[in-house]
């Protein structure tokens, strides 16, 4: 067994914890999360309730219960079960021999615990899984044994009094039962959707409380009479079926036995893993941690229909279960390289939310598509105007994520272009992509200002990815990203005809776009080789290392940014926008410039965004700054495992899995250390960390999955599929057939 | 004697107070201020020191002692005198029969007080004046009597340990004496200028301390042996003479006797008053209060050379003794109508500070003249970036008065145009005015943004006169004022040739200016008849009456505005920019629109700027809303007398006389209630308050002073100069000769 820290261990592909403490329930519930992109069941135990942060979060259940936060709902928990003596839960008694596990390859979690009663010890073995085969199903099997005689009451049922961040979503909750199991239905508070949950379990003495239905079974345990039960929950909503209650009833009737469900799920998981099964030789911990992050990236991603990846996946309601730019910039690369269908599905989500983006543009006086900063099902803006709290005054802070962080639109356009270029999906471009690009360019054209005095277009009053500095002009990341998308759109207009020609730009529009293409201000590198993050950034107070600025905190929960946080008038960054720019556009600046800027900005960066470590690791690895890259990669790999990020900021709960970091960890290995890129063909410029011997990397290229084993000196193609693959290594073109190996030397 | 409130009374033209309390020393020192535009001696008594807020503020002594605030210096106090028994000041004993006065027509202040010693009462009569005849001179005469025998020590001298707001300006202080008196010299902390003070007084036992020089005289008082002395101080600086110490020595040698100095000052004051001697019949208190405000406006205005009017005049160092837009908008009208030479002198000050304005424009990436928000001698920006303090966190607040309140430049241009139009001073236009207008237009052209999407120029990211809302776009006041100046500049370019032709716009510049003139966005009145103060204002929370918003204060000293004060996300205003717009451009909107907007904005206005009451009084009076106007006028007249404004805001001391309000009170009477305007000739549309019978109003027209007596029904010309005056009354042209009277009827 290998130690990870924080009482976590692993063995092969299994995460193990042998200590239980309610204080860690929020975090452990996320780490041991089960899920399948449709739902996430937090890693809590059968007896867990609201106070233990039990929650089953189902996608496509957005609801606004408190008038402010629209978020995914936590549905009724159909896997509730407790064991009681004289009405009191035995789990209140001392626990010994505790052990919980999560097998990343199968998604199965277990708990093994012995409860010390007065005269007898009861051992409980709990096994759960969210089916990867049938997304509506979560199964549980529990077996209990005692070392002496004891009579227990098993209380099984559906608990509707669940953990919810912002208000009670479940209204008009009703319960029912029949021979097959228990049923519950609820109506979402504002969305009015119907949620139905059914649980297959023992049906004996039915008890109905306002927020639960239970079945009671009397169990007499002896050393020679262990007891076991299975409990299977199904869930759906009115987004999926007209009559959810009928649907779950039918589902229970047709339900396969527990073992069949489990086997099917394991099989689906096995297939799921194939394209994502990266192996790191040389450091088992890194290998495991990467797998852990990939597991969470996968279960966070809806694949059943075009829906967003939540910034905390389905691990908690924080960040509203909604997509940010994270989806296109951090989660997308893994799918682009390993399973492009999923990438396409995510882009289709952005296509289906174009109307929301159009509405947002219109609302603020612009044209085209201004994508929501926080995007749920419809793409309407979910980000409230007042987000964080000034903890010193108790007053809400008006952050302008929803209004000034306009790069989101260009990030979406950038992802469209990446997908189409890399997979030559011309049909997608015609049917969806071009329309998105046109609408994004239209938005840009309505958003720029022409400054006669400087004879150029500028992008004024924005917020870059470094969210601590709001209301800035000509943010380098934003301007370059916008320009790239506009330029490529103009080119695409020559090459493609959109399915919907009504969307095409008018002549006067096209003329304006060409003028913007020619005269949009693109900040240049100064004499010192530096690219200014935004106009006036270099005039701000320089504090190196950035962390010293935290000495100015009055309250540890203070928000660091706009309008009057400790970083606002300093060069201290949440994350570095120029490094971010290099991560997406390495082609724009030569490596020397990128290195100079990396060394300038990194010490000024607080890395208080969970997005920062992977960006820095990726860019540093590409630049051959391997030790620096590995340092940031280590941080990225353990953000969740070691719980290094805060759960609360500016008074707002932001806990849960860092889904973008989970996905981007894969990208650091592939695009960073393995140096994979797509530039009219596969490129590979590896810079492996010293601690690693090799990376085994499956990549989806030219319509099929290929696998490469990359060492410090060689690149070998290890898949068995036929046909050569063209690949540029350190600038030299090669072709690699199955089994062939190339020796390379480092470029820097 | 008439009661004013706050223990203040008046009799004819004399302000009287019969109660003394150190708690009121800051305010009383301002109310009883003596001055002459060159210096201000605070209304404190001979024995007053730092703790009593004694201070003599001399113009043109800007210095930065604390690294942040450049302000006028308080010079050495040469009128210090104390009476002692056994080394203790007799002023520490009980005071009775206290009475202090300030005669507004002569500028003479007095104190009469009886000090109760153990066995005897000592009566002290103190008289002081700052000479209006010789600006470097302040005189004092004191006579003391006792009702029994008592021996006193008179300590006279120069005290350099004076009240100073932000740091110690007086460095390297040295002292000297000769037969004529005492001398002191000091060097200003950062400015390095030399200040010299000399005092003519008894020269007996000389005592030198680090920060003072004194002369000690032994006095034996009996009921039949009163004692009196005169003490005369002179002051200058190295801005005026090469060797200030030599200059003050020479000055003492040549000094006329006290009575001659006093007579000369009284004579000068009498002449000074002639053009400003407005009389209000029907309400003696209003009449007195107006005179009080005019007195303070006059002593705040430098006339000896082109220097700014400080926002607190020379009554305190707050607001840095520097000019704001107040000078052009609030103080200028009185001079435009009563003494145009002073108006011209103030405009020359703006001309001489053009380089400072050019430098500021350049620093921020613009062209032309961006006038300083806080303008001292050179016109360089004195406004610190961090001004107020967030009293809840203790952190400084970045207000953007110096960067975003760009209307200052257009206000200066507006004043140039007013002066030239009203007095047909074509020479001024050619020699100075046109250059200023060109540079201001040049600044505008470099500051606008063209928004292709809306096919118009916009002015983005500004702060209007309502300072609570920073970072707004298309502030109606700013856009209209900018457009007016640009349009008039283009016209002036056709009519005049500047002395310096190098300043003329290039052809491409001119083309741009014409384009801006044609396409600058000028917000229009909406369907409800309302003009939006800035883009998005109507979307903010409406709180009526505005004062209810103060319930949200956490700390009474909180700054109300940007970035997170209580008003920021509401429609609550410090002062109303649209009403402000009507005050300077009544011609732009018909009266109905102005009334609709007045009624909308007034209840949303907190009037927490001392500039707000006169603006509202002026506009309301013009619109015939007489009771409303009179309510605001009453407030304006008593801002200082009743001390209704705060002395501290956001942790910054802002006490002292409200000089703009002092001057604008005159403007409300003339331009508001008397309805005077200049529109290619004199216009008069009176709306007198019900409480007033008549206004007697001298006006400088066609090169001479004329006087009008305006009642509710008639306008009579009462001066004796010859020649007719053309005047439009309620739209009808008339000519008025001396002694002629016209009956008018109200237009509304």
Image (spheres, coloured by chain):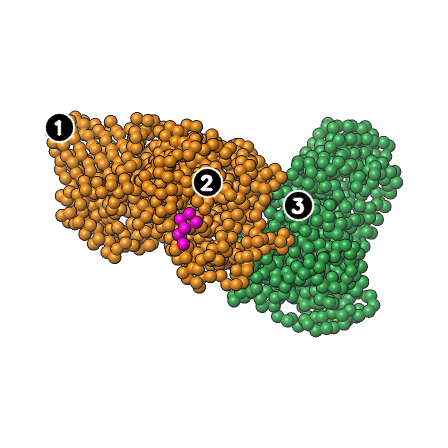
Chain colours: A orange, B green
Q: Considering only vertical position in the picture, is A660 above or below B612?
A: above
Which quarter of the image is occupied by the C terminus of chain B? bottom right
Pick whichever, B80 or A601, lies toward us.
A601
Image coords of residue B268 (percent x, y): 81, 51
Q: Quadrant of residue B42?
A: top right
Q: Is residue A173 visible?
A: no
Query: What residue is rendered at 18% in x and 40% in y?
Result: A259
**Looking at the image, which is closer to me, A278 or A435?**
A278
Marks 2 and 1 sit apart, C-alpha to C-alpha, by 69 Å
The x, y position of residue A191, in whole percent, is 33, 54
- Residue placed under numbered mark 2 in the picture: A733
The residue at the point 27 percent across, 52 percent down is: A237
Q: Measuring 23% from the left and 36% from the top, which residue is drawn there?
A: A127
Of badges 3 and 2, nearer the viewer stands 2
Q: Earlier in the sequence, mark 2 or mark 1?
A: 1
Distance from label 3 to label 2 (Cα)? 51 Å
Q: Is residue B649 above or below residue B505?
A: above
Structural crowding at the residue carrying mark 3, measured as other residues with C-alpha within 10 Å and reported as few (<14), some (14–19) or many (≥20):
few
Q: Residues within 10 Å of mark 2 (few under 14, many from 20)?
A: few
Read off the chain for label 1. Answer: A
Q: Which residues are magenta?
A: A421-426
User: Residue under circle 1?
Assistant: A223
Residue B363 tag number: 3
Indicate whether A1 appears above or below B142. above
């Amino acid at each position: 067994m290998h130690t990870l820290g924080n009482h976590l261990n692993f063995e092969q592909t299994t995460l193990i914890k042998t200590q239980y403490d309610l204080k860690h329930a929020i975090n452990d519930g996320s780490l041991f999360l089960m899920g399948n992109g449709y739902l996430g069941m937090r890693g809590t135990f059968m007896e867990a309730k609201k106070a233990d942060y039990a929650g089953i979060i189902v996608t496509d259940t957005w609801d606004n219960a408190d008038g402010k936060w629209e978020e995914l709902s936590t549905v009724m928990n159909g896997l509730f079960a407790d064991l009681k003596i004289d009405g009191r839960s035995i789990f209140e008694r001392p626990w010994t021999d505790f052990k919980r596990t999560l097998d990343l390859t199968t998604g199965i979690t277990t708990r093994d615990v012995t409860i010390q009663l007065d005269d007898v010890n009861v051992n409980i073995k709990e096994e759960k899984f969210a089916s990867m085969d049938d997304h509506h199903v979560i199964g549980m099997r529990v077996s209990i044994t005692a070392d002496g005689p004891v009579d227990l009451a098993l209380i099984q049922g559906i608990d509707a009094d669940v953990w919810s961040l912002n208000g009670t979503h479940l209204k008009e909750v009703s319960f029912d039962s029949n021979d097959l199991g228990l049923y519950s239905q609820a109506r979402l508070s504002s969305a009015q959707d119907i949620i139905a949950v059914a649980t297959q379990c023992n049906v004996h003495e039915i008890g109905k409380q306002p927020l639960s239905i239970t079945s009671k079974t009397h169990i007499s345990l002896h050393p020679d009479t262990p007891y076991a039960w299975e409990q299977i929950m199904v869930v759906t909503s009115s987004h999926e079926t007209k009559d959810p209650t009928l649907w779950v009833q039918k589902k229970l009737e047709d339900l396969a036995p527990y073992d069949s469900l489990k086997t099917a799920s394991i099989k689906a998981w096995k297939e799921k893993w194939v394209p994502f099964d990266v192996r790191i030789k040389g450091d088992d911990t890194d290998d495991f941690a990467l797998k852990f992050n990939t597991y969470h990236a996968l279960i966070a991603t809806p694949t059943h229909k075009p829906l967003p990846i939540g910034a905390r996946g389905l691990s908690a309601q924080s960040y509203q279960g909604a997509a940010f730019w994270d989806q296109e910039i951090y989660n997308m690369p893994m799918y682009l390289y390993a399973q492009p269908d999923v990438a396409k599905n995510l882009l289709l989500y952005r296509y289906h939310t174009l109307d929301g983006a159009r509405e947002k543009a219109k609302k603020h006086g612009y044209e085209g598509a201004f994508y929501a900063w926080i995007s749920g099902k419809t793409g309407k803006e979910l980000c409230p105007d007042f987000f964080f709290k000034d903890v010193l005054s108790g007053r809400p802070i008006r952050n302008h994520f929803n209004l000034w962080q306009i790069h989101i639109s260009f990030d979406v356009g950038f992802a469209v272009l990446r997908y189409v270029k890399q997979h030559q999906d011309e049909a997608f471009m015609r049917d969806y992509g071009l329309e998105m690009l046109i609408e994004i360019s239209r938005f840009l054209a309505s958003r720029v200002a022409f400054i006669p005095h400087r004879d150029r277009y500028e992008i004024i009053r924005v917020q870059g990815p470094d969210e601590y500095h709001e209301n800035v002009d000509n943010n380098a990341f934003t301007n370059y990203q916008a320009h790239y998308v506009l330029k490529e759109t103009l080119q695409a207009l020559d090459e493609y005809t959109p399915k919907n020609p009504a969307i095409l730009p008018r002549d006067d529009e096209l003329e304006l776009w060409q003028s913007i293409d020619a005269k949009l201000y693109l900040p240049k590198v100064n004499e010192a080789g530096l690219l200014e993050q935004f106009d006036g950034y270099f005039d701000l107070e320089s504090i190196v290392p950035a962390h010293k600025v935290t000495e100015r905190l009055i309250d540890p929960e203070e928000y660091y940014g706009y309008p009057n946080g400790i970083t606002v008038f300093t060069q201290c960054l949440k994350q570095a926008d120029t490094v971010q720019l290099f991560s997406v556009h390495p082609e724009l600046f030569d490596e020397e410039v990128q290195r100079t800027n990396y060394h300038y900005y990194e010490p000024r960066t607080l890395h208080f965004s969970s997005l920062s470590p992977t960006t820095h690791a990726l860019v540093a690895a590409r630049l051959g700054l391997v030790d620096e890259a590995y340092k940031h990669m280590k941080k990225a790999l353990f953000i969740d495992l070691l719980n290094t990020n805060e759960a609360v900021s500016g008074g707002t709960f932001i806990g849960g899995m860092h889904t973008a970091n989970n996905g981007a960890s894969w990208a650091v290995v592939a695009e960073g250390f393995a140096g994979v890129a797509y530039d009219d063909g596969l490129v590979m410029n590896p810079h492996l960390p010293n601690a690693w011997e090799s990376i085994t990397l499956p990549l989806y290229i030219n319509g099929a999955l290929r696998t490469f084993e990359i060492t410090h000196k060689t690149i070998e193609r290890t898949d068995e599929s036929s046909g050569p693959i063209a690949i540029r290594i350190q600038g030299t073109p090669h072709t690699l057939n199955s089994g062939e190996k190339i020796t390379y030397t480092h470029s820097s």
